[in-house]
Image (spheres, helix red, strand yellow):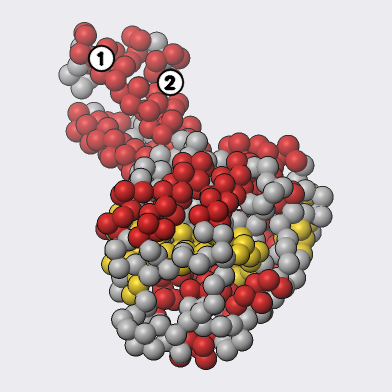
Amino acid sequence: MRWSAWASRYGAAAPVLTHKGPAMHVLVIGAGGFVGRHLVGRLVANGVHVTAAGRDPVRLAQALCGVSTIRCDLARDSADDWLMRLRGIDAVVNCAGLIRDGGRYAMVHDQGARSLFDACYACGVSRVVQVSALGADAGATTRYHLSKRAADDYLANLDPSGSRMDWVVLRPSLIIGRGGQSSALFGALAALPLTPRLGRGKWRVQPIHVDDLIAGIVRLLFREAPIAARIDVVGPEPMTTDALTASVRHWLGLAPVPIVRLPRWMLAAVTWLGIGPVTRESLTMLEAGNTGDVDPLIAATGLVPATLSVALARTPATDADRLAARLMPLAPVLRWLLAVVWLAGGIVPLILTPASTNLALLAQVGLTGTPATAALVAGAMFDIAIGLALLARVRRAAMAGIVVMLGYTAILATTMPALWADPFGALVKNVAILGLALAVHALENDHG
């Protein structure tokens, strides 16, 4: 099969590989993430044989159509683990990346990537595309950037000229597009009644739309000439975060509103509390600036990225986009409120309520003596555990709470039906808490 059609499809300006024989087989690491999902979809739509790799291949298979899926975990897999997976693979794209650390930046971004690159080199993979981050250079200071840069350096040093295994490191700026963390953050800011100003309004970014990033990756995969380069992937126009937020608000179809400056300490508090997709690392990166030179990308791919306004206009906002933007700031607030309910449900009986009162209530359901005391302590500790799990953003903590609450409600409704008429809503309030818990569970951001 000849791939010369790619030249006309993706622009003749960039040199494109003519691939003879079976369709190119591309392995996409981190296929369940934002960039990975878009890349897999584009490759499949154009007849490429794709294997998608992620931590949960079953969920990947449910989310992605027309691909093979395999399990991988960059935090644990060695080079030997990759050798079997790389049989028959022509090119590898590493899109894996963590938003929050949890002590794993170095394990996933650096050590895990090194094992992957070693295996690619040993297996004779023709080309490796490493999706890094703008700022992962000699001036890197954050753990995120340092871990990405370490992997980039390792890949570049494996074969500096790319004569045996060609490689390219792509360092994108903020990536805009549905399903992305940057879009979620600025969409949430844009949908607020007052537009928050990050910093003093001078933080500069150079966003690129995910469609342009993916088009660039595809062109590089099929480029005939060796690359062996690091390329900043940015849009054509630098802008302040104020301008970016205003553009997203306009895209959402919302009228302009006044801007209010957020103090640095408030931004730091938001990152410490883990509210939304913003982290201490991302805040530091924004503060340092996130701009670059677009010319190397154009030279390597022949692709001229669209301006932000043009890129957003390609896919007009829908009611679902506006709803998502308004709900995103509420998700962490609802989670914290639900956590407070569970923590209070465990702490109050243990510390504030007289033991005699608690034991008298348990006696009404048939528990007395040591079993009653044990049940009281166990129930309180269970409530506290669920509250802490919610604060720690443990997956399905809200659903676990729903199961426990339904169990409590069923027991009390059976043994003490008079509680339905309690003037303080001893049981009725569980209906409202059930709604809150369902909302928290539904708003979990879980790509797998």
Q: Which residue is mark 2?
A: 347
Say which of 57 and 106 sits in front: 106
Q: Is residue 207 above or below residue 155?
A: below
Q: Residue at x 31, y 17 (%)?
A: 377
Residue 233, label in figure: none
Is residue 16 shown to the viewer in this render? yes
Amino acid marked by disc 2: Ile
Is residue 432 shown to the viewer in this render? no
Q: CA distance from mark 1 to mark 2?
A: 15 Å
Q: Is residue 61 left or right of residue 150?
A: left
Number of residues whose C-alpha sits closer than 10 Å to that of mark 2, classed few (under 14), some (14–19) or many (20 or more): some
Horizontal and vertical percent position of residue 376: 30, 18
Horizontal and vertical percent position of residue 395: 38, 43
Q: Is residue 234 above or below residue 381?
A: below
Q: Which corner quadrant of the image does residue 259 belong to?
A: bottom right
Q: Which residue is mark 1?
A: 374
Secondary structure category for the residue under label 1: helix
Q: Which corner quadrant of the image does residue 192 belong to?
A: bottom right
Q: Is residue 433 above or below residue 82?
A: above
Q: Residue at x 57, y 87 (%)?
A: 11
